[in-house]
């Protein structure tokens, strides 16, 4: 039970990233504070994946490297789909998002939020 909820959230994230990353030509955000909106989407999506990935798997380095490689593969696959293009900048934004998710996970591990600590683990 402890892993089912994070796994459901992780898989929902995979589905949304694949949908918006490959199949849809819609963007959720236009521009935010003068930044390209798709970069904000990349950071947020992969921060989410990094956080829930670390709730499910260890060691941290495997999760981080795996998600960064997955972001790179997603960028390469975008060359095969209409309305999309591969971009190193997007891959960098996705990689930054993974690191943001790791940071959030790391901070929450040590907060005295009892129910959350049981899920996140404090080992």
Image: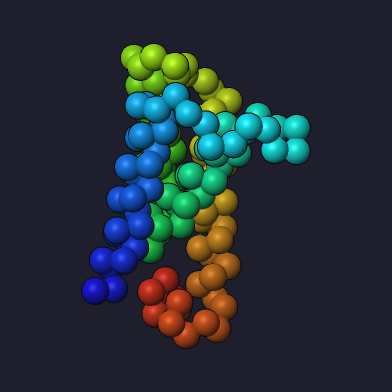
Residue 78 vertical placement versus 26 (above, below): above
Residue at position x 70%, y 38% from top?
32
Q: Is residue 39 visible?
A: no
Q: Is residue 33 visible?
A: yes
Residue 105 x %, y % = 50, 63
Residue 22 x %, y % = 37, 26
Query: In the rendered picture of this protein, how many numbered marks are placed on residues?
Result: 0
Pick the residue in front: 32 or 4. 32
Residue 75 x %, y % = 43, 24
Residue at position x 42%, y 33% from top?
20
In the picture, measured across the screen, residue 49 lies left or right of residue 38, that is left
- Visual colour scheme: rainbow
Residue 81 vertical placement versus 120 (above, below): above
Which quadrant is the C terminus positioned in? Answer: bottom left
Pick the residue in front: 113 or 28. 28
Quadrant location of residue 121?
Answer: bottom left
Residue 90 x %, y % = 54, 28
Residue at position x 58%, y 67% from top?
107
Which residue is farthest right?
Answer: 34
Which quadrant is the N terminus positioned in? Answer: bottom left
Quadrant location of residue 108?
Answer: bottom right
In the picture, measured across the screen, residue 49 lies left or right of residue 96, that is left
């Amino acid at each position: 039970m402890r892993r089912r909820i994070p796994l459901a959230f992780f898989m929902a994230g995979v589905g949304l990233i694949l949908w918006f990353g490959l199949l849809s030509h819609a963007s959720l955000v236009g521009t935010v504070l003068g930044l390209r909106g798709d970069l904000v989407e990349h950071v947020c999506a992969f921060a989410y994946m990094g956080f829930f990935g670390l709730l499910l798997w260890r060691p941290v380095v495997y999760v981080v490297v795996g998600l960064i490689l997955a972001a790179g593969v997603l960028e390469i696959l975008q060359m095969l789909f209409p309305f999309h293009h591969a971009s190193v900048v997007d891959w960098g934004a996705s990689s930054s998002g993974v690191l943001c998710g790791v940071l959030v996970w790391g901070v929450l591990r040590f907060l005295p939020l009892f129910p959350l600590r049981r899920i996140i683990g404090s080992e």
